[in-house]
Each structure stands twice: as structure tokens, then as C-alpha cells.
Image (cartoon, rainbow, N blue to C red):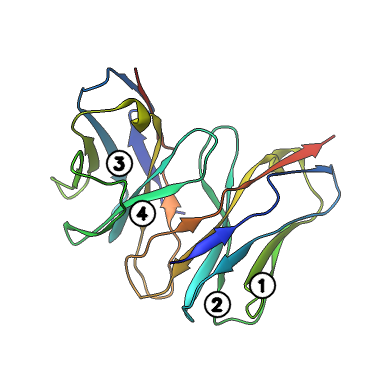
């Protein structure tokens, strides 16, 4: 199973501040995803990323959100001006893209708390 | 749009017994994948088992097996010989098979408690 790490494990920020969440996958991953889980709720898709561009994004992923993979390794999610309702667990997921191998493997998550 | 429904918010089972978690889904697609993910208190999402829609044979992984009924759009998870470590939230998830980047659509989850 591919290893995916995420940093930080827990981020506390003030409303209106910018946060950057990082995902560090092992190589050979082609597809990258961010999901969000508000406490006690289901996991929701935010965005998918392939070949250095967004493949699909949900209605949650508005102009306050952005993603990039600047160095070919780290995959980041930026929230420009955080709101209270952005408090959630944020999961990065990766997929190798090998034929017939469609599992997505999740990182341990970053718990974001907006005060 | 695809939807996934888990009708059992909470379930409990005695250690060593068998439990079945239900999942139904709605789609007009013919090629897709179904998954069960486990989320223990650490909140890590762990893949338990997957099923390709084109396969009639039900997937199994050690003590975990599924009952996939394509016509009924049902995908239940059976856990045999339940262990205390199986205590977790279990999420059923759906993915369209388009050979590339596709999002997972999750159900709301079932909280499973294994009692000693």
C-alpha cells in the first residue's frame, strides 16, 4: 500500500488567515485528490489533480481554495482566507493510475481548526 | 449524480461473531468500482476491500467479504470473527471507472462497535 504523509497533523488558525496543507506521496502516483470531513459527517470530495492541473472540483472548492504541486513532489492545498466552517479533517489521497488499479490511498489527514 | 446510502448509522456486535453492514448506491453507469473504507478513532481512512462492477464474484479479504448485488445496487460488507480492533466507522464508497482520475463518493458511514 502506497505511503502518503501529510503535514501538519493539526493546524490551528485564526479566521481570515491563509493555511497551506501539504501532502507528500511516494513517487509513481499520477492522480491526487483532496477530501474533507467535517466532524461527524461523511467524507466529501474537494478536488482532483492530474498532470499538473485540476481534473475536477466540487462546489465546495471555491475561489478561496487552490492546489498545486510545485516541486513535482509535495501536493498542497491552500485556503486563502479561512472561515469557521473550514474546520475539518483534510485528507490527501493518491492513485497510481495503473490499469485496473483504481484504489485511492489516503494520508493520515490534517485536522484544521479555525478559531 | 451518484449517491451512496448507508442505512445503519450504528451497529454493535460481540467479539468473534459476524456482522453485516449495508450499502446501496444509485448510478446509471455500467462500469464502476465499489469500496469499503474503515476509519478508526485515529481518523485515518483505511481501504478494506474493493469490488469491480464487471466481476460477478464477490471480493474477499481475510475476514472481510462483500455481497455485491448489481441489479439491486447493493454492496454489503460482512465481517467474520469480529475483533475489538474492528471497532471503527465504516464508509461505503463508489467510483466511476473512466480509466483515470475519478472521485470517490462516500456514504454517511456506519459506526461499528465490537464488544468484548
Task: State yes or no: discs 4 and 3 in contact (Cβ < 8 Å).
Answer: yes
Q: Secondary structure at mark 1?
A: strand
Q: Nearer the viewer, mark 2 or mark 4?
A: 2
Q: The residue marked by circle 2 belongs to what chain? A: B
Q: Which label belongs to residue B53?
A: 2
| Residue at 38% over, 29% down | A87
- The answer to whether residue B92 is above or below residue A40 is below
Task: State yes or no: discs 1 and 2 in contact (Cβ < 8 Å).
Answer: yes
Q: The residue marked by circle 4 belongs to what chain? A: A
Q: Are marks 3 and 2 on the same chain?
A: no
Which badge, 4 or 3, comes first in the chain's sequence?
3
Q: Secondary structure at mark 2?
A: loop
Mark 3 neighbour class, 10 Å CA radius: few under 14, some 14 to 19, many 20 or more: many
Question: Which residue is disc 3 drawn over?
Answer: A23
Q: Which label belongs to residue A94?
A: 4
Q: Quadrant of residue B22?
A: bottom right
Calculate the distance from the C-alpha at mark 3 to the C-alpha at mark 2: 30 Å
Calculate the distance from the C-alpha at mark 2 to the C-alpha at mark 4: 21 Å
Q: Secondary structure at mark 3?
A: strand
Task: State yes or no: discs 1 and 4 in contact (Cβ < 8 Å).
Answer: no
Q: Which label belongs to residue B68?
A: 1
Calculate the distance from the C-alpha at mark 1 to the C-alpha at mark 2: 8 Å
| Residue at 51% over, 62% down | B3
- The answer to whether residue B108 is above or below residue B113 is below
Residue B98 lies, in percent from the top left, at 36, 75
Q: Are marks 1 and 2 on the same chain?
A: yes
Calculate the distance from the C-alpha at mark 4 to the C-alpha at mark 3: 10 Å
Q: Are marks 2 and 4 on the same chain?
A: no
Q: Quadrant of residue B48?
A: bottom right
Which badge, 1 or 2, comes first in the chain's sequence?
2
Amino acid at each position: 500500500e502506497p505511503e502518503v504523509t501529510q503535514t501538519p497533523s493539526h493546524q490551528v488558525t485564526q479566521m481570515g488567515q491563509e493555511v497551506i496543507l501539504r501532502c507528500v506521496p511516494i513517487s509513481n502516483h499520477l492522480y491526487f485528490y483532496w477530501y474533507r470531513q467535517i466532524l461527524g459527517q461523511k467524507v466529501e470530495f474537494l478536488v482532483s489533480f492530474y498532470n499538473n492541473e485540476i481534473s475536477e472540483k466540487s462546489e465546495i472548492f471555491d475561489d478561496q481554495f487552490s492546489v498545486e504541486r510545485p516541486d513535482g513532489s509535495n501536493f498542497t492545498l491552500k485556503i486563502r482566507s479561512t472561515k469557521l466552517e473550514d474546520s475539518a479533517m483534510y485528507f490527501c489521497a493518491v492513485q497510481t493510475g495503473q490499469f485496473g488499479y483504481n484504489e485511492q490511498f489516503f494520508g493520515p489527514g490534517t485536522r484544521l481548526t479555525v478559531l | 449524480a451518484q449517491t451512496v446510502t448507508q442505512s445503519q448509522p450504528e451497529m454493535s456486535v460481540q467479539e468473534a461473531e459476524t456482522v453485516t453492514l449495508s450499502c446501496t448506491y444509485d448510478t446509471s453507469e455500467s462500469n464502476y468500482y465499489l469500496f469499503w473504507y474503515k476509519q478508526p478513532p485515529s481518523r485515518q481512512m483505511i481501504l478494506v476491500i474493493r469490488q469491480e462492477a464487471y466481476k460477478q464474484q464477490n471480493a474477499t479479504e481475510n475476514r472481510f467479504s462483500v455481497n455485491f448485488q448489481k441489479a439491486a445496487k447493493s454492496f454489503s460488507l460482512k465481517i467474520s470473527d469480529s475483533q475489538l480492533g474492528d471497532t471503527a466507522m465504516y464508509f461505503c464508497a463508489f467510483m466511476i471507472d473512466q480509466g483515470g482520475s475519478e472521485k470517490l463518493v462516500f456514504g454517511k458511514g456506519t459506526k461499528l462497535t465490537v464488544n468484548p
